[in-house]
Image: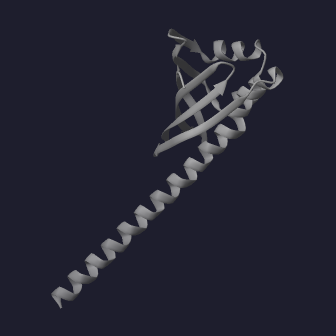
Amino acid sequence: MKTLLLTAFFACTLLASKAQTSNKMETQKIDSTAIAQALETYYFKGIYEGDINTLGNVFNAGTLLFGDVKGQPYAKTLDQYLDGVAHRQSPKDSGKPFKGDIISIKVVQSIAVAEVKVKMYEFNYHEFLSFHKIDGKWLIVNKMISDVNE
C-alpha cells in the first residue's frame, strides 16, 4: 500500500512538473512572438520609414542607447535618437536597401533580449535590444549597437 501511494505521489508530481514546464514554454513562445511582432511592426518599420510615432510605440520613455558607430562611441537618450531619426532622410525615401533581421530572442519572465541586425545606408548594425514587459506590453528599455563590417 505504501509503495502504491508513493508511486501515485511521484506520478502526480511528475505530471504537475511537466505541465508547469509546458506552460512556461508556451508563455515564452507567446512572449517571443509578441516581441518579434513588435520588432517587425514598430521597430524595423519605424526605422525604415523614419516614423518616430511608429518607433515610439516600441520604446520606453527612459530608454538609453549606447555603442559605437564607425569606431566612434555612441551614447544617446531616446529623445536624441528620435530627433536624429526625424531629421534624416529615411531609408524608404532614399531608395537605398534596408533590411532588418531578428537573430534571436531570449525571454526570462518579464525581461528579454533581442539580437537583431539592421542594414541601412552604408551601415551594418549589430544590436542587442533589452525589453521589459510593462503593463502587458513589451517595450525596449535599452539599445546597444555596433556598426560592423560584413
On the image, the x and y values in percent for residue 139 come to 60, 34
| Residue 118 screen position, x and y as percent | 62, 29
| Residue at 69 percent of width and 20 percent of height | 121
- For the view shown, which residue lies furthest in the bottom direction? 1
Q: Where is 139 relative to 16, above or below?
A: above
Q: Is residue 139 above or below residue 96?
A: below
Judging depth in this view, the residue of 45 and 65 nearest the camera is: 45
Q: Look at the picture and state if 116 lies above or below 120.
A: below
Figure quadrant of residue 40: top right
Q: Residue at x 50, y 52 (%)?
A: 28
Which x, y percent locates residue 86? 76, 16
Q: Work out which quarter of the rendered image holds the N terminus and state it.
A: bottom left
**What residue appears at the point 26 percent right and 76 percent down from the top-left corner?**
10
Q: Is residue 52 left or right of residue 125?
A: right
Q: How is the image coloured?
A: one colour
Does residue 81 show up? yes
Viewer-proximal residue, 1 or 47? 47
Q: Quadrant of residue 39?
A: top right
Residue at 54% across, 26% down: 150
- Give the tally of numbered discs: 0
Does residue 136 show up?
A: no
